[in-house]
Image (tube, rainbow, N blue to C red):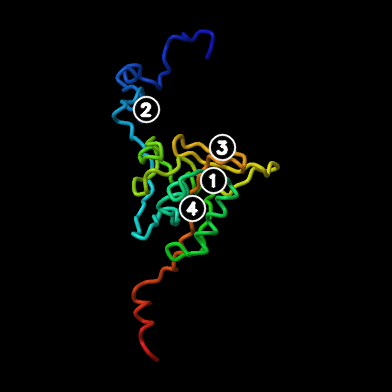
Amino acid sequence: MSENDDPTEFDDAVDPEALEGEPETEWVGENEWGDEDEEDVAVVEEEVPNFIDNGDGTISDTISSLMWKKDDSYKEHSYGITWFEAHDYCEMLNDKKFAGYDDWRLPSGEEAKSLFSFTQSNLDKDEAEIHISDLFEPSGGHNTWTYEEKPDYQQYAQKFSYVTGNDMWEHKDNEYSHCRVTRDVVQEEWEPEWRKDSKTFER
């Protein structure tokens, strides 16, 4: 631009009137900006395990592929047990092959937690609410021992509460605890029906 040029004048290549009629820039999705209505927000529902009563004193969880005894140690004995007695309880069930199985055991912390859901309701021995499926027998204990031991402190084991949904480390000699026992359900390898039918042919 030279000294004699008026800086307020537009370049000859640009038509000022054309600029005035030019529409404003629209940003994609600008109408969606701002506060969202609460009713438009999807509510994520808590996943509830799919329990099945097998009719033989056991409950199957089809999501985690676990089978549980329908009642717990308190329901059967009417007193609390230590962590060591909980293992003895499992061995007793295995010796008599409860429901036809001899691989009953204490659950892990995560397995014990898989029974818990605030959408489920049952009653413990004191008629207090616990959050497990009502398919399980009522009037049992409100917690369960797990097989998990505290690292570097072997005198403690993990216990899970079905009242609060919390786990805790408890001394193994604590006599005010209970246990729910479980076992793994071995799934047969899936194969199509036509392959099963083909095996019936004699060669």
Residue drawn at point x = 52 percent, y = 14 percent: 1
On screen, 148 above or below 101?
Answer: above
**How much space separates mark 2 and mark 1, taking CA atoms?**
67 Å
Q: Position of residue 85 (x, y in %)?
A: 57, 50
Closer to the chain start, of discs 1 and 3, is 1
Helix, strand or loop at label 3? It is strand
Q: Are marks 4 and 1 in contact (CB under 8 Å)?
A: no
On screen, 19 above or below 55?
Answer: above
**How much space separates mark 4 and mark 1, taking CA atoms?**
13 Å
**How much space separates mark 4 and mark 2, taking CA atoms?**
59 Å
Which label belongs to residue 168?
3
Name the kind of residue labelled 2 in the image.
Trp
Closer to the chain start, of discs 4 and 1, is 1
Q: Position of residue 145 (x, y in %)?
A: 54, 45
Badge 4: residue crowd in 10 Å (few <14, some 14–19, many ≥20): many
Closer to the chain start, of discs 3 and 2, is 2
On screen, 78 above or below 95?
Answer: above
**How much space separates mark 1 and mark 3, taking CA atoms?**
16 Å
Helix, strand or loop at label 4? It is loop
Residue drawn at point x = 41 percent, y = 50 percent: 71
